[in-house]
Image: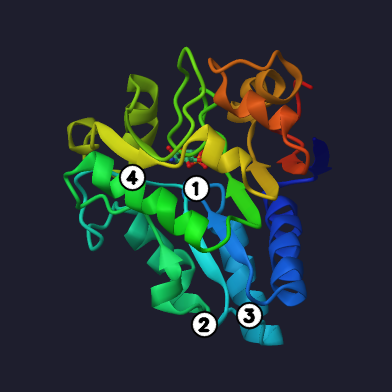
Amino acid sequence: MQIFVTKDYQEMSEAAADMIVDLVEEKPGCVLGLATGSTPEGLYAEIAKRHEAEDIDFSRVATFNLDEYRGLPADHEQSYHYFMQKHLFSKINVRPENTHVPNGANPDAQAACDAYEASILLAGGVDLQLLGLGHNGHIGFNEPAPEFPKETHCVDLTESTINANSRLFDSADEVPRQAYTMGIGTIMAAKQVLVVVSGEDKAQIVRDAFFGPVTPEVPASILQFHPNAVAIVDEAAFSLC
Ligand code: GLP
């Protein structure tokens, strides 16, 4: 795993946006795996800026998001569909039919997850998968567990994730208890992985995930075994390494 340390959040966002834009320029029909959370907001803003200023063309790009809350319709303000629309899709010329997010509105978990996994394969797999890092080491919504889940599946969110994400809802009670997420196998199958991490509150988990033992109790630790993984981490998040 290659780790780049940046001065701050803005520099991290610019470096990550550069990598994604470079790929789109090199391979206009590429498949991007995308992530939600606060960390990628800055890099999505940078991509939007670059699209506007340099006319970067996303019309042939396909996107697959990591995860979605089970039970939230696409137009719910806290759904990841809504997040992606607001922060990225509405700002670039990606075609709506080429953007994919697991269907949280489908109550049939097996069907929703199987269809999602199949659509990734049909698209030829993910060229570059963007990831954030949860405080407990989760990637997507793959929570610490006794084993690494392989494919897209339905998960029960942990208390720590519910609490962390409750800041975006009116109260913790409103945070859905389950989500559909790509599995660790789905993520590891991406040709390249790009993890972005910022802030002192992530310093301990950066150390555990990138320098500690590889274990499903720290799901992101598996990225140490990915043949083409890049982490862009700001100084604050790298401060315990
Ligand atoms: C959420 C998402 C993850 C994200 C993580 C960290 O639960 N499902 O994909 O990476 O939390 O989010 P943040 O960047 O806001 O710290």
Q: CA distance from mark 1 to mark 4?
A: 25 Å
User: Mark 4 CB in 8 Å range of ligand 1?
Assistant: no
Local SS, label 3: helix
Q: Which residue is mark 1?
A: 38
Q: Position of residue 131 (x, y in %)?
A: 58, 44
Q: Earlier in the sequence, mark 2 or mark 1?
A: 1
Residue 237's place in the image compared with 118, above or below, is above
Image quadrant holding the C terminus, namely top right
Q: Earlier in the sequence, mark 2 or mark 4?
A: 2
User: Mark 1 CB in 8 Å range of ligand 1?
Assistant: yes
Q: Name the residue rendered at 41%, 40% in the picture.
A: 152
Q: Which residue is mark 4?
A: 113
Check if mark 2's residue and mark 3's residue have beta carbons within 8 Å. yes
Q: Name the residue rendered at 47%, 36% in the picture.
A: 183
Q: Which residue is mark 3?
A: 51
Q: Is residue 64 visible from the viewing direction of this image?
A: no
Image quadrant holding the N terminus, namely top right
Closer-to-camera residue (96/80): 96
Closer-to-camera residue (110/24): 110
Q: Quadrant of residue 50?
A: bottom right
Q: Quadrant of residue 137?
A: top right
Check if mark 3's residue and mark 1's residue have beta carbons within 8 Å. no
Q: Which residue is mark 2?
A: 93
Q: CA distance from mark 3 to mark 4?
A: 32 Å
Between marks 3 and 4 in the image, the one whose residue lies nearer the viewer: 4
Local SS, label 1: loop
Q: Is residue 185 visible from the viewing direction of this image?
A: yes
Circle 1: residue type: Ser
Q: Earlier in the sequence, mark 2 or mark 3?
A: 3
Between marks 3 and 1 in the image, the one whose residue lies nearer the viewer: 3
